[in-house]
Amino acid sequence: MPAPSRLASFDWSALSSLRLRARALTDGAYAGQHPSQRKGSGVEFGGHRAYVPGDDLRLLDRRAMARHDKPFIRELQTETDRAIRLLLDASASMGFQGGGPVSKLDFAAALAAALGRVALSSGDPVGLEILGGQGGRSLPASAGREAFERLVGVLDGLQAGGDLREDLATLDRAFGAVARRARRGSVLILFSDLIDLPPETLSRYATLASNGRTLLVVRILDPHERIFPFDGPVRLVPLEGDDEVETDPGAVRGAYLAAMAAIEEDWSRQLTPRGGRLVSCSTDQDPVGVLRSILQAALAGRR
């Protein structure tokens, strides 16, 4: 018997698998609309490649031919032919589930799968980079029917784990791969709680906005993290690190909420001047509404 989906506890339209949840989420976000795969002539320079018989001779680049002494074609990129790169934080803190119906990683996986389906249905290739976690792997940007199945397969088998502050190599690999491979016009979407990340994560991610890329950050929190509803003496045990804390929530709630808001403000401050956007949500929100917000942010960033 196959293992139950990692989102089986999410009581959402009585659907049991991540694949079906992603499709339901997508259909809900596009209710009343009928998106189609558009094709047309290129509108943006996308690089050079060697000429092959049958290419449109009008696209021959004479300057490149003069430099290399052989024919080259100027590739043009359509508005819809832009890769989507999903970067998913799967560190231990993303496994937290307190006041929401699912963990932060569950919620992020559903959103990522749905966004992948939206992009692939429009003809855009989708790639995936995993930050931390267990059982995950990177996926190169690809399109086609099988790309969605591969994406869902990785996301559904992913488990939260690890401390990114102690594993800078993971961050280097993921961001380095995106910097090398994400072409001009790509949309990069980072899913994370933005908690306990290495200090350089924000600046490293912001630099990926070069070469016409659009940056989005989807911050996902549990309702307990967002409002800190506890009363009386509590012991807080971190999922990353060893800093157990015994405290009075009433005495520290104000400072805690201010610190959480400061994280968001720092990210927005560096993303906004680069055309980036931050979407903040919690796991008790309607995921269809969150998906719509992400799609709107992506469209705004492209403009």
Image: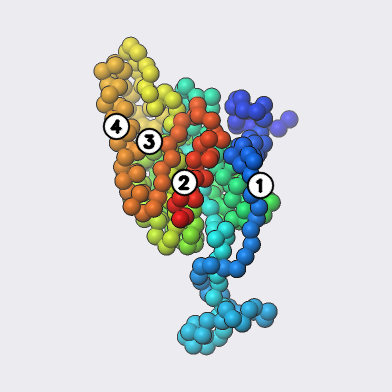
2 or 4: tag closer to the N-terminus? 4
When the figure is inspected, residue 150 is found, relative to residue 50, above or below; the finding is: above
Q: Position of residue 208 (x, y in %)?
A: 40, 56
Determine whether, in the image, residue 275 is placed left or right of residue 2.
Answer: left
The residues tagged by marks 2 and 4 sit, at their Cα atoms, a distance apart of: 25 Å
**Mark 4 sits on what residue?**
259
In the rendered image, residue 166, in percent from the top left (x then y), is placed at 37, 41
> Which element carries disc 3, helix, strand or loop?
loop
Q: How many marks?
A: 4
Look at discs 1 and 3 and give the one toward the viewer: 1
Categorize mark 4 by other alpha carbons within 10 Å: few (<14), some (14-19), many (20+).
few
- Locate the N terminus and report the quarter of the image it occupies: top right
| Amino acid under disc 3 | Ile
Residue at 47 percent of width and 62 percent of height = 184
Image height check: is 134 above or below 14?
Answer: below
Cβ atoms under marks 4 and 3 closer than 8 Å = no
Instruction: Determine the residue located farthest toward the right in the rendered image.
Output: 1
Element at label 2: helix
Residue that numbered label 3 is attached to: 195
Q: Nearer the viewer, mark 2 or mark 3?
A: 2
The residue beneath circle 2 is 297
Q: Earlier in the sequence, mark 4 or mark 3?
A: 3
Find the distance from the CA under tag 2 to the CA under tag 3. 22 Å
Residue 42 appears left or right of 279: right
Q: Which residue, as the protein is rendered here, is positioned at the far front? A: 32
Q: Nearer the viewer, residue 2 or 209?
A: 209
Residue 34 disc label = 1
**Which image quadrant is residue 245 in?**
top left
- Distance CA(mark 4)–CA(mark 1): 42 Å
Q: Earlier in the sequence, mark 4 or mark 1?
A: 1
